[in-house]
Amino acid sequence: LHGFPEYSGAWEEVAERLSEQYYCIAPDQRGYGQSPAPDAVTDYAPARLVADMAAIVTQLDAGPIAVVGHDWGSAVAYGLAILRPELVEKLVVLNGVHPGPFQRALAAGGAQSAASQYIDWLRADGSEEVLAAADFAKLRGLFAAHMEMGWLSGERLAAYQAEWARPGRMRGMVNWYRASPMRVAKPGEPLRDVPAPNPNRLRITCPHLLIWGTQDRALLPEATEGLETYAADLTRVNLPGADHWLHHQVPDAVAATILRFL
């Protein structure tokens, strides 16, 4: 399951390697690529995003599955494992965050809060127009200042821009942020009224692998602290030198790590 601002093509390198042993399905999620992009923010509520993926598994009679998620795709993968555990045999997350530890880190007013200030910017009215202007210059620049984006160039960049240019896709993509219940503190101003999550309602019962590109500047290690509280059968693997885009930067290492886990 891909994240922002990608589409199913995000998995080209990794899926090619996994498909030597497993049948792989990489869908365009709601609001992305060739999937529908409804206009209303409420159409991107987390439960609806999870229901989309559950419907694919059910339609294909494929469960229980091993689900792999990156970035926002990890949020849906976590949701699928939490809400529909009968469909998920194993859970793999690449630089993604569980809602419990992530909300705690976002509310703390520390480093993760500072790194996530872009979330409220994306939620603002009109952000999709700003992202799309000048051949998506703002969108392309969101991560370039802090992460290695050499993988997004040439033919791949052209393919991504073609997907971004589909009608309604920019709005669909930012509607994921608008519909999310996550609250982001200002740096140095922790939120005191965010209720503590209930681990029993957010528990991962299947084996869980977390693969982490250690140079990520968007999602920080503190956003995964305490994950063991929610996932008793957790394996952590760090990939030094890779950042948020590890599936493009080191696809061999990512695929090999997943295959060992499966």
Image (cartoon, rainbow, N blue to C red):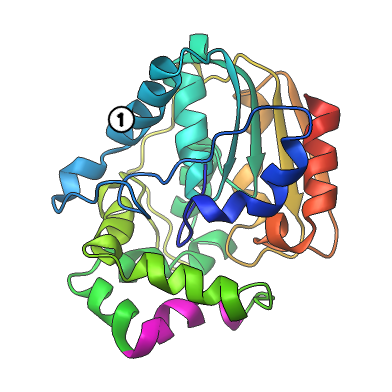
Q: Quadrant of residue 22?
A: top right
Q: Nearer the viewer, residue 81 or 169?
A: 169
Q: Residue at x 83, y 51 (%)?
A: 252
Q: Quadrant of residue 43?
A: top left
Q: Residues within 10 Å of mark 1 (few under 14, many from 20)?
A: few
Residue 158 at what x, y percent from top left? 49, 76
Residue farthest toward the top in the current orientation of the protein: 86
Residue 117 appears anywhere in the view: yes
In the picture, measured across the screen, residue 68 lies left or right of residue 238, that is left
Residue 153 appears anywhere in the view: no
Q: Is residue 167 magenta?
A: no
Residue 208 at what x, y percent from top left? 69, 26
Q: Nearer the viewer, residue 7 or 175?
A: 7
Q: Residue at x 61, y 50 (%)?
A: 11
Question: Disc 1 residue type?
Answer: Ala
| Numbered range of the magenta stretch | 134-145
In the picture, measured across the screen, residue 262 lies left or right of residue 45, that is right
Q: Residue at x 47, y 64 (%)?
A: 116
Dominant secondary structure of the residues highlighted in magenta in the image: helix
Q: Is residue 27 above or below residue 222?
A: above
Residue 13 at what x, y percent from top left? 70, 53
Identify the residue position indicated by label 1 in the image: 47
Q: Is residue 141 magenta?
A: yes
Q: Nearer the viewer, residue 192 or 147?
A: 147
Q: Residue at x 39, y 64 (%)?
A: 163
Residue farthest toward the bottom in the current orientation of the protein: 134
In the picture, measured across the screen, residue 53 lies left or right of residue 105, that is left
User: Could you tell me how many numbered marks the image carries?
Assistant: 1
Considering the numbered disc 1 on the image, is that residue within a helix, a strand or a loop? helix
Residue 130 at what x, y percent from top left? 28, 81
Q: Nearer the viewer, residue 120 or 238?
A: 238
